[in-house]
Structure formats: C-alpha cells, structure tokens
Image (tube, rainbow, N blue to C red):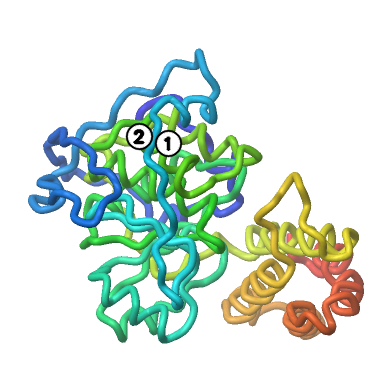
Amino acid sequence: MRGGRQSAEGSSGFQLRTSNFKLAAAPAGPDQQAGTRLGAAPPRCACAARHVAPDAPAPLPRSLSSYEAAARIALPAAAPAADPALHHVFRLSENIVSGAEPEGEEAMQALANMGIRTILSVDGKTPDAAAAEQHGMRYVHVPIRYQGVTGEELLAIAKTFREQQGPFYVHCHHGQHRGPAAAALGRVALDGASREQALAEMRQWCGTSPKYEGLYDAIAFGDLPDAEESARCAFDFPAAHRFQGLRQAMVEASRAFEAVEKLGRRNWEPDPSHPDASARHEAERLAEILAQCAATDEVRERPEDFRVWLGQTEAEAREAARPATRASGTESLSRYLPVAAPGRGAS
C-alpha cells in the first residue's frame, strides 16, 4: 500500500485479520468513469459492467473541512425510499444503495426484489448471512468505527466494491453515518464519482452527522486505494468479521459495555456527542462478541472459572438488551466486565 495510510490500530479496534488480508500479484487496469446521481433510472455504469475500476482521485485540499466540502455541490432534495420493510434507504446509483440494517424476512425479500446481490455491512453486529443467502445474496462484513476508517478497512471496502457482484446494499445500524461513508467510498471506487459528489450525498441525502467528521475525512482526505492495490490485496470477503484473538475481542467488548454504561447514566437519553448510539444495539453487540469468544479454541482451553464468567457476562448482556430490564442488566454487567476481564486472563 502507498505510504501515509492510517494504522489499523488507529481509529478502529476492528482490525482485519492479517491471515485473510495479504498482497498478491493480480493487477487490474483502471478506467475513469463519470459518477451517477440519484434518480428513477440512472444510467448503467460501464465500469461495473466490465468489472473495471476507475482511478482513485487525489485527496481534496484542506482549505475547507471535510464537512464544509460536503456542501460545495448542491444536490436536489431527496427523501428516503418508501418501503415498510427497510429504513433510511437512498439509491445513490444503479450499483449502490445505502440504508439501515435489514431486519427480518421482509427486509431481505425487499432487497432481493431490488436486485441486490451483495450486502456490505460496516456495523459491529454480526450479519445474518444465512438469511441473505436464502434470497440469493451474499454478505461481506467490514466493521468500522465512528471515529473514521483505517487504511486496511478502506482497502477491504474498495476491493469488495470492485470485485464482488453488484448491485450493493451498504448498511450500518441506522444507515445514517458509517454506512453512508462506506457507500461514498463505493461511489468513488466503483462508480467513478468525485469525492465532492460522494461527500455531498453523505451530508445532504443520508444526513451523516458533523459529529463524525472522521468519516467525512476518510472520503475527503483519505489515501484511497487504486485498482492495482485492491487487485493485489487477497482479502477473502468474510461474511462475519473474525477477531484477532481473545485480547482484541475483549477490547471491543469493553467498548460496547462503556457505550451502554454511558447511556445508562443518561437515563437512556441520546448523547449529543454520539447521536447514533443505541443501548440495545450495543448490548446485543457485546453479547455477540462474547458468544464468538466462547466458541473459540482459545477460550475452551481456559480454566473453567473463566468460561463460567464469560457465559455469565454474555447472559447479562442479553438481559441488558431488553428494555424492561436494561437498568438492572447494566448494573449486573458492571460486576463482570470492567474488573473481571483483566483478572481472568483475557489479556
């Protein structure tokens, strides 16, 4: 990769597993194409049809902030698509649709009816890959954080757009912040849209908050991988993110717990500094992380008291996700996670 990329330890605890993320010699020729705009019948993108990626445009000058740059192009007003099974859906081009997490059979059927072939999740929650497969779609999971997108994550997302079958549905949890940032990368890497156009769609259509300027920065100033770089990267498009061992999983578990705990102190009212935070979602994510840990050989080889602690913490997280018991659930969680994890050998 080119110099100047952000370390994978930087803005995201979700590092990509290096055994699934290597460089191999498989260059591809770039081909610049014009981006498309939202409409009932956007023109077909030739680069997607031929599976040839456009050049990665140079970063924008820093004379404006990335959020200010997102207002340089004035877009026509657009409302989310009206679909009772899906939420906050914007068709950004023929190839790329941005929206909230698809939940349930009706949502998956709605995506299939739209012709979606690949679902890219950048949320921390494990996707329902089996449900997508039943409808002829596949999931790719590259979780990112609100603070921004690392170089390795940019590379994995760009490679997904360039090498998997479209059209793509890109989502996070609510479909307003991280998902639109990933979709913006696809607009540039696959559709050939300008960085200004992609930023404008994030801000003016999808409503990405200025609180998450790191997401805007990734599109405006990030060192986006070109076609040759993404072709050489042997990312294996996992349907569910795999942690790099128990240590990394415990770091993410602690982050999820802290998010729930902060909301609990606010009596479950939204935090203005983190408008997308959801106690239920973070508690569910915590439970899933712990369940993934319990299924690993590393945990099976641990002493019984550690495995019991892990099971108790997972159960408390699932209880905390229930609205009627959320307060007591987080109080119970506090007995386990912050103190017990380091003392039980998680590090």
Percent position of residue 26, x then y: 16, 45
- For badge 2, the amino acid type reads Gln
x 61%, y 37%: residue: 210
Q: Residues within 10 Å of mark 1 (few under 14, many from 20)?
A: many
Residue to which mark 1 is pinned = 200
Percent position of residue 74, x then y: 40, 31
Q: Secondary structure at mark 2?
A: helix
> In this orientation, which residue lies closer to the viewer: 207 or 33?
207
x 91%, y 73%: residue: 331
Can residue 293 be seen here? The reply is: yes
Can residue 123 be seen here? The reply is: no
> Which quadrant: the C terminus?
bottom right
Q: Residues within 10 Å of mark 2 (few under 14, many from 20)?
A: many
Quarter assignment of residue 212: top right
> Which quadrant: the N terminus?
top left
Percent position of residue 117, x then y: 25, 69
Please tell me whether residue 194 is drawn above or below residue 179 in the rendered image. above
Marks 2 and 1, how far apart at CA? 5 Å
Q: Is residue 272 left or right of residue 191?
A: right
Q: Secondary structure at mark 1?
A: helix
**Which mark, by number, is residue 197?**
2
> In this orientation, which residue lies closer to the viewer: 6 or 307?
6
Q: Confirm or deny contact between disc 2 and disc 1 (CB under 8 A).
A: yes
